[in-house]
Image (cartoon, rainbow, N blue to C red):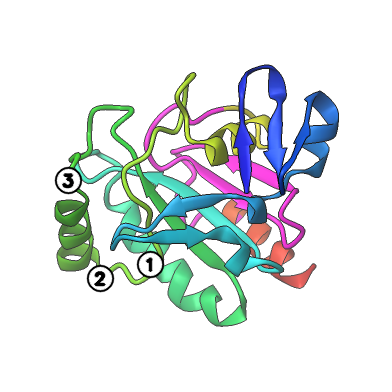
Amino acid sequence: MVEIGRRGAILLGGALMVGDAAAASASLYDFRMEAIEGGPLELAAYRGKPVLVVNTASFCGYTPQYAGLQALHEKYGPRGLVVLGVPSQDFNQESSDNKKIKDFCDANYNVEFPMTTVSRVRGAHAAPLFAFLAERGGGPPQWNFHKYLVGRDGRTVRGFSTQTGPESRALVQAIEAALAA
């Protein structure tokens, strides 16, 4: 498991690594989150698959992007893409109740892709996964529904802003390229 501390140090598989060596060694598959249903969500389960990580919110003008994310899950999931929703209250547009979030997503968007519990996605208290994604994918989310596409290697990360919708040509082309790699 990876834990990123200050000054770029991480604990990777029991070995403490610092700075550039730590960053170069880490991959998406080293992280663990909590599933919205409860229990651990080991990202190692997605090894070898491209993963689209999205910080989500239920009460945002971009909330309808859930429909597009579900469509990506349905279209590209059989080919290996994993869509991972990470609810966040960092922009004050999300409930703090995981059950309410899950119920909202199920009732309004029939979300079937995996989701985590509410997590911090920016700043000093960001979840280690988001610190990793921000470092490799162009910085932290500036708003809800920021997307990070992680390649099959777990290390290649490309960030997409909130305004890049799930159906956008740029994102779809990147997903197809990641699936082809």
Residue 174 position within the rendered picture, expressed as x and y whole percent measured from the top left = 67, 57
Q: Which mark is residue 110?
A: 2
Mark 1 lies on residue: 70
Q: CA distance from mark 3 to mark 1?
A: 21 Å
Q: Nearer the viewer, residue 111 or 114?
A: 114
Q: For the point 60% across and 27% down, which residue is it?
A: 139
Can residue 148 be seen?
yes
Decide whether residue 147 is among the magenta residues. Answer: yes
* Residue 25 shown left or right of residue 166 in the figure: right
Disc 1 marks which amino acid?
Answer: Gln
Examine the residues drawn in magenta and state their main secondary structure.
Answer: loop
Q: For the point 27% across and 47% down, which residue is it?
A: 63
Q: Nearer the viewer, residue 54 or 24?
A: 24
Q: Are marks 2 and 1 in contact (CB under 8 Å)?
A: yes
Mark 3 lies on residue: 97
Q: For the point 24% across and 28% down, which residue is it?
A: 92
Q: Are marks 3 and 1 in contact (CB under 8 Å)?
A: no
